[in-house]
Image (cartoon, coloured by chain):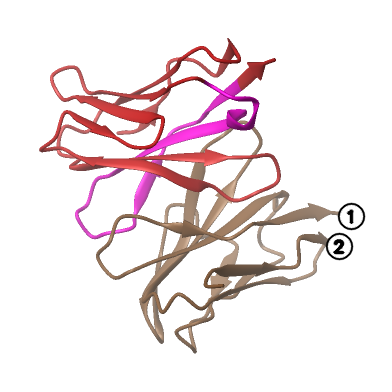
Chain colours: A red, B brown
């Protein structure tokens, strides 16, 4: 079946370094992608999103890159802080009906002080 | 503050028992969703509703039931037919036809 997946289940970085979390998707018809951050025991929080007509979108300390040629999505976090430690999920919208996202497995980011 | 409230935070179910998880939102969103999250896995859609008194099955609806009598509320019942109910349950809402979901803080359901 079609799914969103992550290359790495865990990522450990030093405080102050940049982090890159990767995500592969298989449905070329997906036109919307979104990243969430989930801290332990809490619900996912929106980080940033991007539509398929864009290659890059920047937020505060975060950048999402979309490569439609290889069906790859990445989340870059600049100057990673201990508060960034969490599980990060990518998700895609495949049916153009709004809100029915397909989620990947998640990557756990651990920031070492 | 506007948001989504899930209760209880923790819930225990005895074998053969039905339990109901509450989800209330004051964001004036039309659409509401229930997801199930198992350890180390992504979120899977159980049910969703885009309008009052109407709802659709998601990918893993078996053993669950929902109702949508009010725009603000979308309770989920985990029935005795759900043989593996232990999981973290997340409720979400969105504007109609908007892909961005806003999530509640979740309910951890465990079996006694």
Name the subunit of mark 1.
B
Q: Is residue A20 above or below residue B20?
A: above
Judge the density around disc 2: few (<14), some (14-19), many (≥20) Cα neighbours within 10 Å. Answer: few
User: What is the quadrant of residue B13 in the picture?
Assistant: bottom right
Q: How many marks?
A: 2
Q: Is residue B77 above or below residue A8?
A: below
- The percent coordinates of residue A56 (x first, y second) are 21, 29
Q: Is residue A33 visible?
A: no
Name the subunit of mark 2.
B
What is the quadrant of the N terminus of chain A in the image?
top left
- The percent coordinates of residue B111 (x first, y second) are 82, 53
User: What is the quadrant of residue B65 in the picture?
Assistant: bottom right
Q: Tell me, yes or no, whether the two marked residues, 1 and 2, touch with CB atoms within 8 Å.
A: yes
Pick the residue in front: B86 or A112. A112
Q: Residue at x 58, y 56 (%)?
A: B90
- The percent coordinates of residue B84 (x first, y second) are 70, 49
**Tag 1 secondary structure:** loop
**Tag 2 secondary structure:** loop
The residue that label 1 is drawn on is B112
The residue that label 2 is drawn on is B14
Judge the density around disc 1: few (<14), some (14-19), many (≥20) Cα neighbours within 10 Å. Answer: few
Q: Residue at x 41, y 86 (%)?
A: B53
- The percent coordinates of residue B92 (x first, y second) are 49, 62
State the CA–CA distance, disc 1 to disc 2: 5 Å
């Amino acid at each position: 079946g079609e799914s969103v997946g992550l290359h790495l289940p865990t990522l450990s970085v030093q405080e102050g370094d940049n982090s890159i979390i990767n995500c592969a998707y298989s449905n070329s018809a997906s036109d919307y992608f979104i990243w969430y951050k989930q801290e332990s025991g809490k619900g996912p929080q929106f980080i940033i999103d991007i539509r398929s007509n864009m290659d890059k979108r920047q937020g505060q300390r975060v950048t999402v890159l979309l490569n439609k040629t290889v069906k790859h999505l990445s989340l870059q976090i600049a100057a990673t802080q201990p508060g960034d430690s969490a599980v990060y999920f990518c998700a895609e919208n495949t049916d153009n009906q709004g809100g029915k996202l397909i989620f990947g497995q998640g990557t756990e980011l651990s920031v070492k002080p | 503050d506007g948001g989504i409230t899930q209760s209880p935070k923790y819930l225990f179910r005895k074998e053969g028992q039905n339990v109901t998880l509450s989800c209330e939102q004051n964001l004036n969103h039309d659409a509401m969703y229930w997801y199930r999250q198992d350890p180390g896995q992504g979120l899977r859609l159980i049910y969703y509703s885009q309008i009052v008194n109407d709802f659709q099955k998601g990918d893993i609806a078996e053993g669950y039931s929902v109702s949508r009598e009010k725009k603000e509320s979308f309770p989920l019942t985990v029935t005795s037919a759900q043989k593996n109910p232990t999981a973290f349950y997340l409720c979400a809402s969105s504007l109609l036809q908007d892909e961005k979901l806003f999530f509640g803080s979740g309910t951890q359901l465990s079996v006694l």
